[in-house]
Image: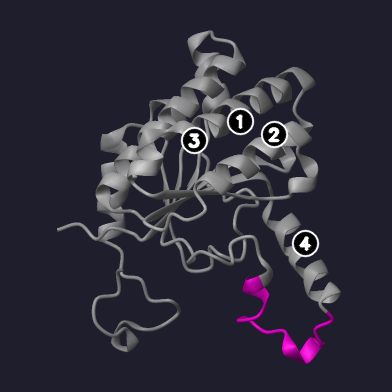
Amino acid sequence: MKHIPRHVAVIQDGNRRFARDQGLNTAIGHRRGADTTEEFLDWACDLGVRHITLYTFSTENFRRDREELSSLFTLFQEKFLAIIKDERVHRNHIRVQMIGDRTLLPDDLLATIDAAEEATREYADYYINVALAYGGRNEIVRAVRRIMKDGLLPEAIDEDVLPRYLDTSFMPDPDLLIRTGGERRISNYLLWQLAYTEIYFSDILWPDFDESALDAAISWFSTRQRRFGMTPEQVEGDPLP
């Protein structure tokens, strides 16, 4: 029997390489990746994964050329608009939220994101978190600034207080991180939250990631004994959620 992680984070890597390998325009690679994302969400929710966090666009991605950025922002706009009318979202009570530095995004895209968040605000069965204009270091810097703005004394700040100021304060830490595309690094993603996350690397490019690939990741996760810094003797009961 598989142990299903409560929270799966994903680094969706390989859209541009997929396009290059197929002789396609980069924008088509991103759209194929977006199609995979929609399918992935269906598969994961069907398995019972309640929280999914997608590394969609990093702070470093702003360095890409203007044409690619324009096509990406257009794609994001389309996808957030679609969420508002997506029957699957409302039938399954899926709350959609963005994490990341909103000050870096265009106003029209932000307005659409706000509308999608408002349309799903009351839902609490599943959570889809879109990391957009997101960087782990950027998030921690913004959290520290908020702490300073609130006037907290240094001795009041501990490992329970700081997470309340992170973008992810409303969600549990990820149980499983899946990174596709063959790279073996976390690329400035959820630096605080991944402290005890099981990390699964796949060589499959994101547009080629299918249901069997997700099943392989979940099966691998089922074999892990999560210790959180403890010895096996200190772990009480089943160490997996």
Question: Mark 2: which amino acid?
Answer: Leu
CA distance separating discs 2 and 1:
8 Å
- Percent position of residue 235, x then y: 32, 83
Determine which residue is flagged by label 4.
Answer: 142
Q: What residue is pinned by disc 1?
A: 76
Q: Which residues are magenta?
A: 151-164
Q: Which mark is residue 109?
A: 2
Residue at x-position 31% and y-position 37%: 213
Q: Residue 82: horizontal and vertical position, in percent?
A: 50, 29
Q: Which quadrant of the figure contains the N terminus?
A: bottom left
- Give the structural element (helix, strand or loop) at label 2: helix
Count residues near mark 1 (Cα–Cα under 10 Å), then give few for <14, some for 14-19, many for 20+: some
Say if mark 1 contacts mark 3, CB within 8 Å: no
Residue 21 marker: none
Mark toward the start of the polypeptide (1 vs 3): 1
Q: Residue at x 33, y 59 (%)?
A: 5
The residue at the point 41 percent across, 62 percent down is: 175
- Image height check: is 214 above or below 177? above
Q: Find disc 3 in the rendering and name its residue.
A: 83
Viewer-nearest of labels 2 and 1?
2
| Labels 2 and 1 touching (C-beta < 8 A) | yes
Of the residues under marks 4 and 2, which one precedes in the sequence? 2
Q: Earlier in the sequence, mark 2 or mark 1?
A: 1
Closest to the observer, 131 or 234: 131
Task: Tell me if label 4 and label 2 are in contact, CB under 8 Å.
Answer: no
**Percent of width and height locating residue 215:** 26, 43
Foreground mark, 4 or 1, reads: 1
Is 127 situated above or below 115?
A: below
